[in-house]
Image (cartoon, rainbow, N blue to C red):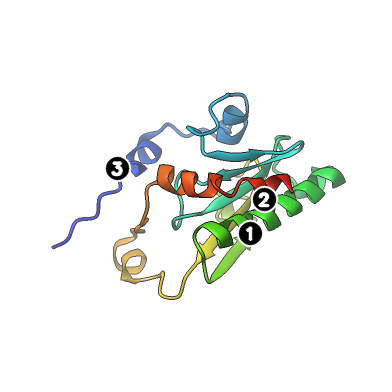
Amino acid sequence: MRKIWAPWRIEYIQQEKSDNQCFICEILEEDKDKENLILFRGEKAIVMLNKYPYIAGHLMVAPKHHTAEIDSLHPATYQEMWQLMSKSVLVLKESIKPEGFNIGINLGKVSGAGLKTHIHIHIVPRWSGDTNFMPILTNTRVISEALEKTYDKFMKHKNIFDE
């Protein structure tokens, strides 16, 4: 029998969870972008790697303003988030060459939102055959690359966000 090791997941599994906790707001207050996997800080929004990804390269775009409601975002925040989402797709295309993308927003717990208090856009790169039996039979996902290595690949294309 093969074993799959994902030791970074234990931090997430064992951490105390609270409805008041917002990891996005917490990391925005820190000056540790690489450690927190923040690729870009815009005026109103950020781009970051998902620390607990569905697949290697899973990015998120989030407003700096803490809100769970899409209708409470300022129009300038909408615009910047959309631009950063589009530029994130370019960074992914340049750095890891996915064949497609899933892009979406989960609003509320019933929609699957892991963080229901701070709205964010998921940008998930996809490849033919990137799904397999693991999630179906074992409720386990296999992430093919360490987050730090993926982060470094993306940072080589950071100039896309500045354009």
Residues marked 3 and 2 touching at CB (< 8 Å): no
Residues marked 2 and 1 touching at CB (< 8 Å): yes
Q: Which amino acid type corresponds to the residue marked 2 in the rendered image?
A: Ile
Q: Residue at x 85, y 44 (%)?
A: 76
Question: Which of the two discs, 2 and 1, labels the residue nearer the N terminus?
Answer: 1
Marks 3 and 1 sit apart, C-alpha to C-alpha, by 30 Å
Look at discs 3 and 2 and give the one toward the viewer: 2
Left or right position of 121 against 95: right
Marks 3 and 2 sit apart, C-alpha to C-alpha, by 32 Å
Of 126 and 158, the residue lying toward us: 158
Quickly name the residue at label 1.
90
Left or right position of 139 against 53: left
Marks 2 and 1 sit apart, C-alpha to C-alpha, by 7 Å
- Image height of 62 relative to 4, above or below: above
In this view of the protein, can residue 51 be seen by the observer? yes
Quickly name the residue at label 2.
160
- Sort mark 2 into few (<14), some (14-19) or many (20+) by Cα contacts within 10 Å: some
- Sort mark 1 into few (<14), some (14-19) or many (20+) by Cα contacts within 10 Å: some
